[in-house]
Structure formats: structure tokens, C-alpha cells
Image: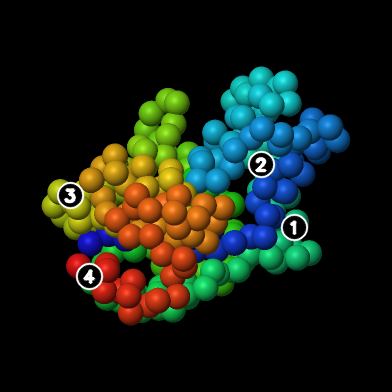
């Protein structure tokens, strides 16, 4: 089994530092009026969020403006965490990761984050990204335009190489906090556990195979995973 964890609002919360750091970067590069009005963040890929932010501010998302935003975002997040390390693990996460470490399942990350900023968020919260042997980041969709729905396919390809045989979708579990996480799991026949630790309620996530308020019921989660 491969268990793929989303990062934001599933493993950790940054207390809004991620969004604020993207805005910091936009303001530094494009002026103080740079805003995020009308831009949707939750469960989306960072390259799509940066593209939408640039467009919302009347800036053409070229490879150059996108690269500058990505670099600026990383610098801003690093600076924010140096003065205020607000990233922290959500309830039950540390216990679940400890219970899973060294047992049967392969652990992975499937996230909209870029590698450098996603890793920084995890490390600041005390979680080692290297503890997940399969890591699929927000800019690793093999298609243009990119979509989260493509990412489980990348994870399945990588774990197949690690396992030395073709992994099947039903051997994969996605754990996430948004309807986007549920949809990407469904697109590949993966099981999906949703947690209402982000902006979506249990009711809004009820179409997952299992929806929980958070990950604190360790025995219940382990039992469901083993099913
Ligand atoms: Mg999330």
C-alpha cells in the first residue's frame, strides 16, 4: 500500500504564512497594490495559484514572471518563518506518522506545493520530508495545463519502480482536506480519506470513502487504512 498525504491543512497548518508569502513576493516584484482578490488557494497547485495571482493583477504569466514569483515566494516564506515559525503539525499527525513509520505501507506526499516551499513548511513543523519516499510536488504534472488529477498517476509510476511491479490504483490511499484531493484520488481508482481540518466541512467532504473531523482517532484511522 502507498499512502499519499496532502500537506496544507492535512499534515500541517502554516497559519496563513503561505498565502501571505505569495502576496509578499507579488508586492515586492509588482508593487504595493498586488492583491489576491478572487484567487482560490485551497487544494490547488502552486503553479496555477501563481498564474492566477499574476493574471488577477494584470500581469502576463510568462516563464520569467512565474519563475520570479516562485523565487520570491520561497524567499518570503523563509523570512517569515525565521521571524515567526508558524508552521505546525495538525492534531494526530505526529502520532499517525510515528505509527506508520517502519510498518508495511510506503509513505508519500502528493501536494500542490513546490518542493522547496513544501519541504520548508514541513521541516518548520517538525516533519522530515525525507520520511516520505514518494514525493509528488505541485509542478510535477506531466501535462499542460497541469492539474492535481494528474499527480496520483506520477506517484503510482514512481512506487511501481520502487516495488518492482505495477502498482494498482486501489493499492493507493490519498489523504487530503479538499474536494480536489478526493477528485484526484477518484481519477485513479485510489481510496481517499478526507479530513475536515481545512476550509471544508465534513459534509462537504462526505463523498470521500471516509471523512473525519481530524486525524486524532489513531486506532480508527489505522484500522480503516488496513482494510
Ligand atoms: Mg490541503
Q: CA distance from mark 4 to mark 1?
A: 39 Å
Badges 2 and 4: C-beta atoms under 8 Å apart? no
Question: Please, is residue 24 above or below residue 175 in the view?
Answer: above
Question: Residue at horizontal 44%, vertical 79%?
Answer: 95
Badges 1 and 3: C-beta atoms under 8 Å apart? no
Query: Comparing marks 4 and 1, which lies closer to the viewer?
Result: 4
Compare marks 1 and 2 and give the one earlier in the sequence.
2
Give the number of the disc on residue 71: 2
Name the quadrant of the C terminus: bottom left
Left or right: where does residue 146 sit relative to residue 82? left
Left or right: where does residue 165 sit relative to residue 57? left
Residue 208 on image: x %, y %: 34, 52
Compare marks 4 and 1 and give the one earlier in the sequence.
1
Question: Residue at horizontal 41%, vertical 73%?
Answer: 97
Give the number of the disc on residue 80: 1
Neighbours of disc 2 within 10 Å: few (<14), some (14-19), many (20+): some
Amino acid at each position: 500500500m502507498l499512502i499519499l498525504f496532502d500537506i496544507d491543512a492535512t499534515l500541517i497548518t502554516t497559519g496563513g504564512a503561505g498565502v501571505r508569502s505569495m502576496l509578499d513576493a507579488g508586492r515586492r516584484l509588482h508593487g504595493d497594490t498586488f492583491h489576491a482578490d478572487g484567487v482560490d488557494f485551497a487544494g490547488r497547485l502552486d503553479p496555477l495559484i501563481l498564474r492566477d495571482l499574476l493574471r488577477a493583477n494584470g500581469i502576463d504569466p510568462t516563464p520569467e514572471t512565474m519563475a520570479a514569483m516562485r523565487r520570491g515566494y520561497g524567499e518570503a516564506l523563509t523570512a517569515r518563518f525565521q521571524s515567526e515559525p508558524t508552521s505546525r503539525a495538525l492534531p494526530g499527525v505526529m502520532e499517525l506518522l510515528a505509527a506508520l513509520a517502519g510498518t508495511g505501507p510506503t509513505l508519500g506526499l502528493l501536494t500542490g506545493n513546490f518542493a522547496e516551499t513544501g519541504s520548508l513548511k514541513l521541516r518548520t513543523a517538525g516533519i522530515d520530508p525525507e520520511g516520505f519516499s514518494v514525493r509528488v510536488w505541485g509542478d510535477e504534472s506531466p501535462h499542460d495545463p497541469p492539474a492535481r488529477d494528474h499527480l496520483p498517476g506520477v506517484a503510482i509510476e514512481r512506487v511501481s519502480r520502487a516495488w518492482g511491479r505495477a502498482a494498482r490504483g486501489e493499492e493507493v490511499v490519498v489523504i487530503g482536506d479538499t474536494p480536489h484531493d478526493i477528485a484526484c484520488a477518484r481519477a485513479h481508482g485510489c481510496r481517499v480519506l478526507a479530513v475536515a481540518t481545512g476550509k471544508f466541512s465534513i459534509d462537504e467532504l462526505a463523498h470521500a470513502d471516509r471523512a473525519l473531523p481530524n486525524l486524532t482517532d489513531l486506532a480508527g484511522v489505522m484500522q480503516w487504512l488496513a482494510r
